Image (cartoon, helix red, strand yellow):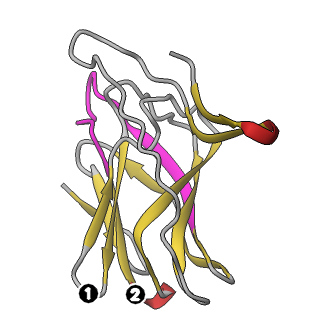
Amino acid sequence: MSSLDVTVVGGGGINNVIKHVGFHRFTGSDKQLIVPINNAPPSTPGQVSQLVFEFRTGGDDLRGGNDNVNILTSFSDGRTQEEDNVNHSSKWDNNSTHSVTIVLNKAVMPNQIASVRLSTTFSGGMGGDNWNMDGVKITAIGNSVNQVLTKYGAKRFAGSCRSVHGDRNLSCHR
């Protein structure tokens, strides 16, 4: 499936796309696609309800299919929120830029976002995927908030570095 748009149609000419999902390949082991329809949680001024990740891919693409990116956000109160397969199994070509928006389960102040972990589902090495992430910018969006939280530079995801974690600097984890 190349893409899916979920549209709300109603009286008075309402016809709005409320969710867009990119490429998804259905296979014998992947027979369904779940599309969460989340609205941003209620927030007070200064609170963040969404995180926008702008990924820049370098000279080695992200293959997609079974080779994907997951994001784990940790909060200062100990809670975590995980978003799996944020590239929706789509290939991210060499030297491309992609935005991923995560709707937080609960609105928080920007300083309550403790860290972010980016992980991949591939093993790297011969026959496995590797991915050159030239950088990622993380922006907090909310009620009167549009703030770049951090920017990370280049990281190569491979068998020896399948995930990175950090608050100010990303470091490799197996």
**Residue 158 image point, x, y percent:** 31, 43
Residue 38 at x, y percent in the picture: 47, 53
Q: Residue at x 49, y 29 (%)?
A: 90
Q: Which residue is mark 1?
A: 77
Residue at 26%, 87% in the rendered image: 77
User: What amino acid does circle 2 point to?
Assistant: Gln
Q: Earlier in the sequence, mark 1 or mark 2?
A: 1
- The image quadrant where one finds the C terminus is bottom left
Residue 172 against residue 119 in the figure, above or below: below
Q: Secondary structure at mark 1?
A: loop
Q: Position of residue 134 (x, y in %)?
A: 56, 53
Using residue 98 as the reference point, say whether residue 121 is left or right of it.
Answer: left
| Region of the chain picked out in magenta, as a range | 119-138
Residue lying at the far top in this picture: please name it: 28
Instruction: Depth check: give the residue in front, 49 or 57.
Output: 49
Q: Which residue is mark 2?
A: 112
